[in-house]
Image (cartoon, rainbow, N blue to C red):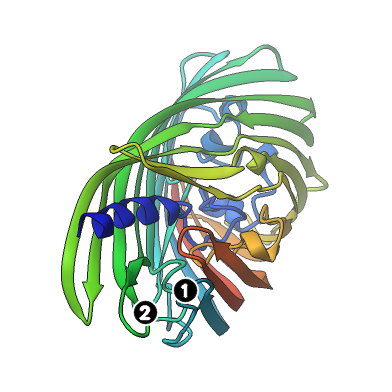
């Protein structure tokens, strides 16, 4: 029994999975922090359309007079379908696992975002953002064929981001902010805890459950350059944030359908979120038409491995070897009338996952294209409403992942897409 408990500890460590789920932006970014930006596929940071520019560029708040509030509600409806799922184990005894393709692993997620800016004087501006930078969730059927790669995965984050900006002159503005980020992750998967000495030998089955959280801190910087009232450029940087997710790893061992052992151990996962660098431009072509564009480089290569360390000294490393990624987006707005403006956007977002043998069930990430449409309607001179819809077309992907500790290989094909709905209120005090 002691050996089985030790196996749970070691295999639980070896079965660690990235604390993220299928998102609609590449990697494990949540992807939408503003509805006005969503309508233009996140291409309009240089426009500084409302207080949500706090997320994209702290210098952008110098282009908002007075005091401004933006509150948004985002609904993400992701869809993942797994097919041709096969799982097998090498060694003694060799085994093939059945259980189906996992069912419907995703469900709609509702997320709020809020921003506030304030003009202190002609040169000094303050901003505050409360937003969700990462997160989603996946829940496969507990008995699906890929259960040894993952069953349930949840990531919740919340960021608090105060900022300060300074308008040097009519052309140049600079800004900076600090970020306090809370992250909470839950994960469960089936495990193979050992082999019973029967004829033929039988696998000792079980399940690992991990729950950890942490606060981390970072910063963001930005600048804008206004060539003339119709043309503006922006540049922004958001730092990596280090989270040491500390919590409990619980293992349950089952033989012949009955639990025979349980173990709880403290575990820690070190996770550094990727930093990003953006360049963007806003051009007012005429009274009706404005054009926007954005290039964002995200340094996902910080995630080369994921390591779970248990209190008893056992640890294990899962290679990820992610690549840095590029995101390209363009947008256009069209002023139909004084109160009504239409927005359109298109974006291509690269995936950081380098190959099928490093793709995992909780994050079947792949390249994606955004098709966005939005409207802005001014109720009066102080209040406006934004609404947006985005269809995210995610490239089909596959996994062929081997886990050293359990000696299991999971193969599957994934087809994914997402619908994103957004509603936002903007108010100027």
- The answer to whether residue 126 is above or below residue 135 is above
The answer to whether mark 1 and mark 2 are in CB contact below 8 A is yes
Q: Quadrant of the N terminus?
A: bottom left
Q: In which image quadrant can residue 111 be found?
A: bottom left
What percent of the width, then of the height, locates residue 154?
A: 37, 58
What residue is rendered at 43% in x and 66% in y?
150
| 260 shown above or below 44 | below
Q: Position of residue 247 (x, y in %)?
A: 27, 43
Q: Quadrant of the C terminus?
A: top left
| Residue 1 seen in this snapshot | yes
Tell me what residue is drawn at x 41 percent, y 81 percent: 144
Q: Residue at x 67, y 39 (%)?
A: 299
Q: Nearer the viewer, residue 3 or 154?
A: 3
Point 72% across, 41% down: residue: 297
Direction from residue 170 to residue 285 in the image, left or right: right
Assess disc 1: are there few (<14), some (14-19) or many (≥20) residues with their C-alpha within 10 Å of its C-alpha.
few
The residue at which mark 1 appears reads as 92
Q: Is residue 155 visible?
A: no
Rounded to the nearest angstrom, the CA distance separating label 1 from label 2 is 8 Å
Comparing 405 with 251, the one in front is: 405
Residue on which disc 2 sits: 201
């Amino acid at each position: 029994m002691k050996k089985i408990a030790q196996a749970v500890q070691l295999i639980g460590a070896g079965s660690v999975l990235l604390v993220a789920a299928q998102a609609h932006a590449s990697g494990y970014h949540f992807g939408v922090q503003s509805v006005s930006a969503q309508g233009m596929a996140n291409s309009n940071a240089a426009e500084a359309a409302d207080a949500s520019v706090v997320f994209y560029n702290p210098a952008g708040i110098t282009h908002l007079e007075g005091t401004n509030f933006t509150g948004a509600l985002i609904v993400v409806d992701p869809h993942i379908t797994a097919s041709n799922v096969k799982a097998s184990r090498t060694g003694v005894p060799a085994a093939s696992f059945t259980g189906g393709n996992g069912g419907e692993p995703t469900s709609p997620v509702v997320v709020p975002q809020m921003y506030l800016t304030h003009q202190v004087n002609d040169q000094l501006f303050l901003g505050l953002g409360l937003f969700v930078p990462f997160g989603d969730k996946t829940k496969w059927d507990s008995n699906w064929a890929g259960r040894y790669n993952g069953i349930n995965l949840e990531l919740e984050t919340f960021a608090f981001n105060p900022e300060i900006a300074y308008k040097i002159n009519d052309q140049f503005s600079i800004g900076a902010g600090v970020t306090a980020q809370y992250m909470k992750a839950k994960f469960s998967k089936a495990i193979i805890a050992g082999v019973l000495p029967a004829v033929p030998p039988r696998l000792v089955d079980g399940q690992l459950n991990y729950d950890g959280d942490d606060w981390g801190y970072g910063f963001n910087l930005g600048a804008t350059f206004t060539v003339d009232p119709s043309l503006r450029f922006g540049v922004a940087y958001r730092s990596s944030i280090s989270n040491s997710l500390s919590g409990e790893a619980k293992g349950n061992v089952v033989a012949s359908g009955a639990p025979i052992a349980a173990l709880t151990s403290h575990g820690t996962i070190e996770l550094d979120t990727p930093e990003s660098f953006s360049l963007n431009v806003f051009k007012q072509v005429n009274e009706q038409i404005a054009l926007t564009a954005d290039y964002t480089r995200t340094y996902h290569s910080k995630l080369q491995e994921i390591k779970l360390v248990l209190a008893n000294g056992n640890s294990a490393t899962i290679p990820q070897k992610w690549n840095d990624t590029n995101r390209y987006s363009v947008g256009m707005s069209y002023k139909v009338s004084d109160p009504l403006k239409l927005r359109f956007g298109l974006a291509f977002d690269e995936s950081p996952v380098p190959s099928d043998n490093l793709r995992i069930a909780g994050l079947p990430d792949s390249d994606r294209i955004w098709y966005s449409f939005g409207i802005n309607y001014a109720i009066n001179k102080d209040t406006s409403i934004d609404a947006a819809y985005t269809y995210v077309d995610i490239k089909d992907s596959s996994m062929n992942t081997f886990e050293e500790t359990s000696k299991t290989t999971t193969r599957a094909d994934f087809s994914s897409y997402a619908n994103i709905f957004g509603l936002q209120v903007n108010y100027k005090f």
